[in-house]
Image: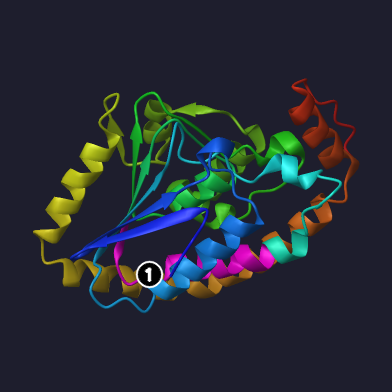
Amino acid sequence: MEFTTIALEKLERRATLTLNRPQAMNAMDDVMMRELAECFEALQQEQEIQVLVIRGEGKVFSAGGDIKAMIDPNKPLDINEAMVYLTRIVKAYYQLPMLVIAAVHGASAGLGFSLALGADIVVACENSKLAMNFIGIGLIPDGGGHFFMKERVGNVKAKQLIWEGKVLSAKEAQETGLIDYVAPGGTVFAMADQLVGKMLASPIVSMITTKKILHAQNLPQLERILEMEAEGQSAMRKTADHLEGVHAFVEKRMPVFAGK
């Protein structure tokens, strides 16, 4: 399977999925979302791979959704199509028959942070920045962000973190319960490799079966949240606050929201 915005490498029982738009900070445009959906759906049928590592090419893990594409007059983002892709991505991702490690360096924001949080284990470099910052452009989390945040920190804390949209250091994210390990500068991929080795030297079929059991019981709730995220995000895209938020982002100024 050939991709242009991601790369998938397989080696015996492990695989590495690399987000590969470094010139755009691995922001997810419609092509990357389609390719991620196709990749995860294909990996659902994988019989040999037992551990998957997700990482970003270049300086960051992922800056999230491609904000500039949201206001591109030549090719405006089709939000309904994007939500279809995201639903496919997250459903396949959550049901992968393997253990998933997200190795985060640089930054993981918005949709990129949703993807990282969906992993079974999240390792972040100590100097990385992590943010569920949809609120800054008048949107709500998507990509299962509500579900994954709630799974990790509970409803009340998830709401507060989403509403605040604060950029967290790796240490702050770990203390909050959003990530699992903090790697010293420049060692995040080495730490991820160590975790892969530990998993592959364990009774990993038992570990994967536990994941399957726990995820199966939560799948109906995830599917409902994905439906509500799609409906909510479509509505948010039509608000004046969202338009102000994306223009302020592109113009590198503080937004002025009106609650509309």
Question: Label 1 belongs to which residue?
Answer: 96
Residue 239 image offset from top left, x and y in percent: 88, 46
Residue 22 image offset from top left, x and y in percent: 51, 39
Q: Nearer the viewer, residue 196 or 142?
A: 196
Rendered-image quadrant of the N terminus: bottom left
Residue ID at (58%, 53%): 146
Residue 32 image offset from top left, x and y in percent: 57, 56
**Which segment is the magenta one?**
83-100
Mark 1 residue element: loop
Give the dominant element type of the magenta stretch: helix, strand or loop: helix
Rendered-image quadrant of the C terminus: top right
At label 1, the amino acid type is: Leu
Q: In this view, does 163 lie to the left or right of 190?
A: right
| Quadrant of res 231 | bottom right
Q: Is residue 149 above or below residue 232?
A: above
Residue 174 image offset from top left, x and y in percent: 37, 34
Residue 97, magenta (yes or no): yes
Q: In this view, does 201 lie to the left or right of 208?
A: left
Residue ID at (18%, 72%): 205
Residue ID at (38%, 32%): 175
